[in-house]
Amino acid sequence: MVATFVLSLAVARSLFPLYSINHDDAMYVYEAKVLGDGRLTLPAAEHDVFRPWASGVRDGQVVMKYTPPWPAVLAAGQWALGSMRVAAAGVAAAAVGLVYLLAREVAPGRRAALMAAGVFAFSPVTLFQGGTFLPYLFGLVTGLGFVVGLLAGVRRRSAVLLAASGASFGVGFFARPFDALLFALPFVAVLAWRLRHEPASLGRTAGWVAAGAVPVLTLDLAYNARTMGSPLALPFTVTGPNDTVGFGDRGVFADRTFDFGPRDGLRALGENLRWFPRWSFGGIAVLGLAGFALVAAARSGWRRTPWAWALAGLTATVCVGYVFFWSPFSMSLRWLGVQTLGPFYHLAVLVPVAILGAWGFDLLWQRAGAARRIGVAAVLAGVALTAVDLPAKVDANADVRDSYRQVEDQVDALGLTSAVLVVPQRGRDGFLSPVPFLENEPDLDQPVLYAEDREERNFELFDRFPDRAIYQLVQQHEAGDVFLEPSLVPTRLRLGRGEGLLLHLQVTNQTDRTHMVAYISDGRSRKVRLLAGDSSWGDRYDVSWHLEPGAAAATPEDDEAFTPAAREAGMLTVGLAAAGPATGREDVRWERRIPYRTVGDEVQLIQPGLGYELLAAGGERHWIARNVDDRLAEAPAVDAR
């Protein structure tokens, strides 16, 4: 337990100082801060562009997707110990202790229990999860607490232990109901079978367990009613009804779903099981020992070793149950979850593997001679397998950490003291964010606020925070970038305003096309100007657009004048098209997209506009964000009047 605690803190410090690749990390910390402030929800109007991604709005309040038990533990750690990290590492250590206690209940001998705890403690998935703020070890602790309390309570005829068991189940169900049910089912089934001829004992056991569970489950229902308006409505659905168990359209948000079917569920199971030996201590060697223990249990008979079958049943319920949930498919086949953090949805399977593997070793050790040597060889092979495979896991997470630190250094270099930083992929795209560590405090009392990019609606930031500098972390392709890995570029946003704005651009031909065409559009109307019909590489052109609001009727009509449609918020597009002389087709284009609005006789712009390039790939054409300063340089707009 001590080793797990210390190593989890070391992993957190070295690999996850800015959170992990799983962006739920930041959500649980945020919820812990909300609870630490004595609140369950936040006012939606105040937190509109600042709220975290895994949240929704109900009755004017921001409701967090995840329930309070695990955030409450983190908040308690912060309050009592001054560190959420210590609380997370403490839960990892508690899981090790509970594995030992469960092994003492179901496996013969203290040696097997100690080895089971060791296998669990030094499994990479345990240590890496213990270094994060993710909830999977906490969910496992509640399941283990339920089972250990239940079995020890029945054996000792202890009402206190049985009630504690029920309370642990209640907390687990409150936190992660699906996991709680999958973990409890095989042990409850075996216990019910063992007490089938003792109805009084079975009833007494169930009664005391219920006595412990009901208060917590009542609190669960009350929380649902408070946040969702109904005791049976789960906060997990606050982002949409598609994040649930079963097949069909699945995803966190209703407009970001995919068709998840049985084949996908089975593929996910296969992929997670393929990675499982590499994330458990001893790998296939310990799995072999666990298989040997099951064979020995089968030979001794069901009645003599019922708990071995409960452990096997736990493996079955978790593996089969998660075939019906879409997220293991996503984390193993659509992003690098299982490669960097292990098969965390199947973390409970590590419990039977650890206990049965230790049990198998103990059986070999007792036989002495060749059998003992085989057991020792299996353990040594397991140590070697774990050691050989560990550096790849460390490197994968170090890459994520380094990418976060690079952005952190960029933001720190700005020296912001009173600012708003518009961040890409916040809000509903937050699960993809390259900067999950840029998170707001629940009270929004901080030097730099991190806002969701609302494009043309970013004017609201200038209106709401007139005394703060507004910056944007622009995600765009720079020269030399890998196509799927755009850079993040900090940019100061400025508000241009005037009754007649002059927007100036410098255009440079960096193609072999001869026809250069400039255009401007507000989405409704469009104006086009031919800059040259015989252009060549390196030629430069000055392009000016006179922007006049609709009320400014005195503006003379010329090819540079443009009257954008009157809007509270819109997007102005200024672009460059380059075409060949033979076809005249505009086959290469670059644009700057500039938020604008009209206020009475005034036009307002947020500059600089974001750059885009039209790329042709696979017979289709797509716009990508790109630095276009070398082709379509934009100067600050000035009031021409």
Image (cartoon, rainbow, N blue to C red):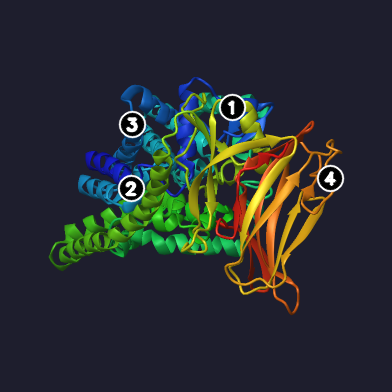
Which residue, given by chain and number where applicable, does mark 4 sit on? 556
- SS of the residue under disc 3: helix
Please report the residue visible at 68 percent of the width from the left and 46 percent of the height from the top.
503
Marking on residue 601:
none
Amino acid type, mark 4: Pro
Mark 3 vs mark 4: give the one in front: 4
Question: Disc 4 versus disc 2: distance between alpha carbons?
Answer: 62 Å
Position of 585 with respect to 232 (left or right) is right
Find residue 20 and report its horizontal and vertical position in percent: 41, 47
Mark with earlier residue (3, 4): 3
Marking on residue 156:
3
Position of 111 with respect to 37 (left or right) is left
Mark with earlier residue (4, 2): 2
Mark 3 vs mark 1: give the one in front: 1
Marking on residue 465:
1
Find residue 393 and report its horizontal and vertical position in percent: 34, 57
